[in-house]
Image (cartoon, rainbow, N blue to C red):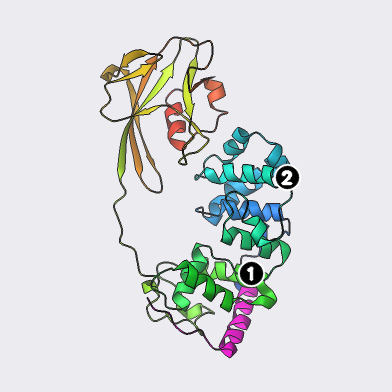
Amino acid sequence: MAYTQNPTSAKKAAFHRALQRWYETHGRHSLPWRNTSDAYAIYISEIMLQQTQVKTVLEHYYTPFLKAFPTLKKLAQADKQAVIKQWEGLGYYTRAANMHAAAKQCKGVLPETVEELQKLPGIGRNTANAIACFSYGQAVPIMEANVRRVLCRVFALTQADDKILWKKAEWLLDKKSSFNYNQAMMDIGALICKKLNPSCDTCPLSMICKGKISPVSYPAPKSSKATPIRHRIIVVLRDAKGGYYVRRRESRFLHGLYGFPEYAPDAKYIVYNNQKYPLKKTSIIGQIKQTYSHFTLQAIVHSLPVPMEKENAGDLYRATLKEMQTLPLSRADHKILGLFI
């Protein structure tokens, strides 16, 4: 792994000036979280932008979430299910659960130091630094995905080693104008120093970039793997009074969402309240396909009639079709629900 020397202080100062000029002209100044010093609003944006594109967050989630939960105190007071329902469609649902837990833990006021921020659930070094810089004006670097790639190229690092990258980020930071610097570095990564086909000829970092001769070599490309296909049988249990039975997911994947029970693709029957229900071709009502970040779900959907329960059946929650539409569901389960609407 290359560990190149830092640019001279003079070059760094010239780079800072060039970056500031570029940001003034080309920066994404209209983004709402760049036009507020509200730590809570900035916190929400930082969590949403993890694993999610700016366009998606901006057009569909940021404003509605803040409208539903306008303050950290309101978020803390909200029901966890309501928070996850508002998050529905954004994916990586532990983010929403962690925000809700963090709001309760800090009692409606975000701490101002990086160290205290990192004690909250779901807040790592990058998120803590972003809140500290953008909300509280502290001169600390950030390290989201785009910035990581930019730094790897600037210093010709074939491996994105966190320890080395943070040292480089701290050295390169413009401490006199950290807000603009950090925002500009993110914009450079998103708009110019792209993963493929970077525009090095228009990049203000070109004066210090060690990797510009072969930018796509930094960091070294990871070997691509075929997305695995996960085959499942999903069963919709319904009673004669219009009740549907779903299970609340407690695992990290799709945490907090409700979903129809899943079974292995070779299952011949299911057991419900100690009674066997065979899975036959005549009980099949359709098929669904849903692509996630790390696998593709392909499922055959069965519908089985079951006796009506006076209360929820074990870990299964009973809801009418109308009530089902108010529960937080995955996109796959929305597709299944669509078979009945």
Quadrant of residue 174 within the rendered picture? bottom right
Position of 278 relative to 291 (above/below): above
Q: Where residue 86 appears, x then y in whole percent?
A: 60, 39
Q: Would residue 276 be found to the left or right of residue 98 on screen?
A: left
Q: Main secondary structure of the magenta part?
A: helix
Give the CA separation, mark 1 to mark 2. 25 Å
**Residue shown at 59% from the left, 90% from the top:** 10
**In the foreground, 54 or 275:** 275
Q: Residues within 10 Å of mark 2 (few under 14, many from 20)?
A: few
**In the foreground, 39 or 195:** 39
Position of 243 relative to 8 (above/below): above
Position of 80 relative to 14 (above/below): above
Q: Name the residue beneath numbered marker 1.
A: 140
Q: Where residue 108 appears, x then y in whole percent?
A: 73, 46
SS class, disc 2 = loop
**In the foreground, 3 or 209:** 3
**Residue shown at 58% from the left, 84% from the top:** 12
- Amino acid bearing label 2: Lys
Q: Look at the image and say whether residue 245 sits in the magenta stretch.
A: no
Position of 49 relative to 257 (above/below): below
Q: Would residue 232 be found to the left or right of residue 110 on screen?
A: left
Res. 54 mark: none
- Amino acid bearing label 1: Val
SS class, disc 1 = loop
**Residue shown at 73% from the left, 56% from the top:** 38
Q: Earlier in the sequence, mark 1 or mark 2?
A: 2
**In the foreground, 245 or 107:** 107
| Magenta span of residues | 1-25
Q: Where residue 117 appears, x then y in whole percent?
A: 65, 56
Q: Name the residue beneath numbered marker 2.
A: 107
